[in-house]
Amino acid sequence: MNCQILNQIKDAFGSLWSCDPLDDKSVRITTPYASLNNKYIDLIVMMQGDEYVVTDGGYVDDAIGLRSSKFIDTILVPYLEEFEIQVLENQKKIYYKKTADLDFVPNCVFEMADFARAMLSASYIDVVASGQDALSDNVEEVEFQRRAKEYLKDSYEDSNYALNFKQKIGLEGRKKKFSAVIATPSEENVIQFLSGGTFYHFKSHITNTMGDFDLLEDYTPLNLKLALYDDRVDIYKDNRDNLHEYLNLLRSRLTHDPVPWSEKDRIKELLPI
Amino acid sequence: MKNTSTKVPNKIKDPHFLARIRALISNEKGCEDCEFSPDRAKHKGRPHDLVDSKPVSHEEEYADELSTTVEVNVVDYSRFTFRLTSDGIPYPFFHYDSAGQAHRNRLQPLGKGDLIKCPHFNTFNEDGYYYAYRTDVIEDQEEHLGTHDFALNHFFIEGNIIPEEGVPSVKLDPKLFTHSSKNPVEGVHFT
């Protein structure tokens, strides 16, 4: 291996640069930098009098404009300060750098591209902004909720039970929401769907469910307290023993052992149609 | 509606989920009312993009409720997006962008076909990877794709959506939309 390899790399990166004219004073430059969600960063370079302006044209604000103030303070502001990026309002926020010196236009492009990429990537990760929402935003969880819901609908739709999803039950002022409530006129049976995109989320769902059932301890209409967990998903398979420690803790709040998805028909035995 | 951006995964790992998504796209679907009049703001308080959605019918192999959404930018109506969405899939899985940033197809060699400019389609390939592609129509008839109706028809054909009556169209209220120059910061003074 010698440094000839650099030519291969430089040629590849270099070929990603491109330029399209926009009008007689501006061009759009596509840079070789792409965000975590696979968008190549482009910038507008324009002349304003004697100065060069390098700007995002407003799309960074489109990506981050709805983020929380925590996101703005911890992620956006440090970049603006470090790179001395300016901002103006024109229906949306437009970020830019200016210089009268052609030698510094590449610096402006370097810093604006880094800034735009960082903002788009951070927004995509949504670490700061999502907060509690992160618990329910994951694909595998949403998909499991859907699968479980469809299964219960297919099983109980024509039965004498009333089927409700994401329903709050409990005493007035102390209601908690559960994935599925299968009710008769005299009692309510709860099935909580448990899954997660990460170990942390899966575990949190289990422990949150424990707390929710605790709050309903003196709610007498509650009959069966069941949990249906996703044993098909990779996160479960990779963390089986750990998750079962938590499922065993949860067991003390349930009326029956937690049911894995692969044995979901057990629910129909416990709640016969 | 949550104020979080939709996070499209770079790869769908569950093969059943992937198969369902690809079937929803490739199976023949119907559209009863395909006249779109975008007039609803996509995000409250940020009236730059207006949307309109219409239901899409399909065989009951899957329980998804499908819709086509047309989204047009008010400041520059040549920037628009068409999406096929499902109530059971928490992100767009087949969409067309008329304008915007080039997409990076990570699995391609850098600098050799990985940069896909707009307009392009975005969807998941047979291995579950999210990627962008340009059709022959895009390569050969790009100038016609500036017309909303032409582009929407192309989207319908590519997405296997068959209009039951009439021709798919986009009606823009001239009071709501303008076509500014290609430069989104034309006329802006940078202090």
Image: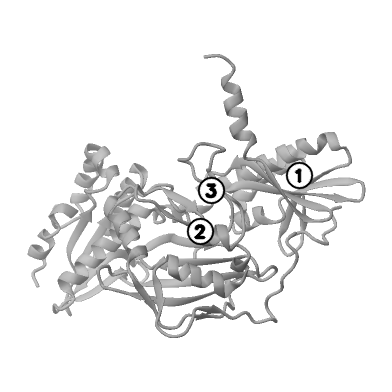
Label 2 sits on a secondary structure element that is helix
On the image, numbered disc 3 is attached to which residue? A128
Q: Position of residue A230 (x, y in %)?
A: 24, 51
A96 displayed left or right of B12 = right
Amino acid at pointer 2: Asp
As drawn, the label of residue B136 is 2
Q: Position of residue A38 (x, y in %)?
A: 53, 46
- The extreme top residue here reads A2
A201 displayed left or right of A76 = left
Cα–Cα span, label 1 and label 2: 41 Å
- Asked if labels 1 and 3 touch by Cβ distance under 8 angstroms, the answer is no
As drawn, the label of residue A74 is none
As drawn, the label of residue A85 is 1
Seen at 63% across and 58% down, the residue is: A62
Query: Would residue B132 be seen by someone viewing this image from the given angle?
Result: yes
Q: Earlier in the sequence, mark 3 or mark 1?
A: 1
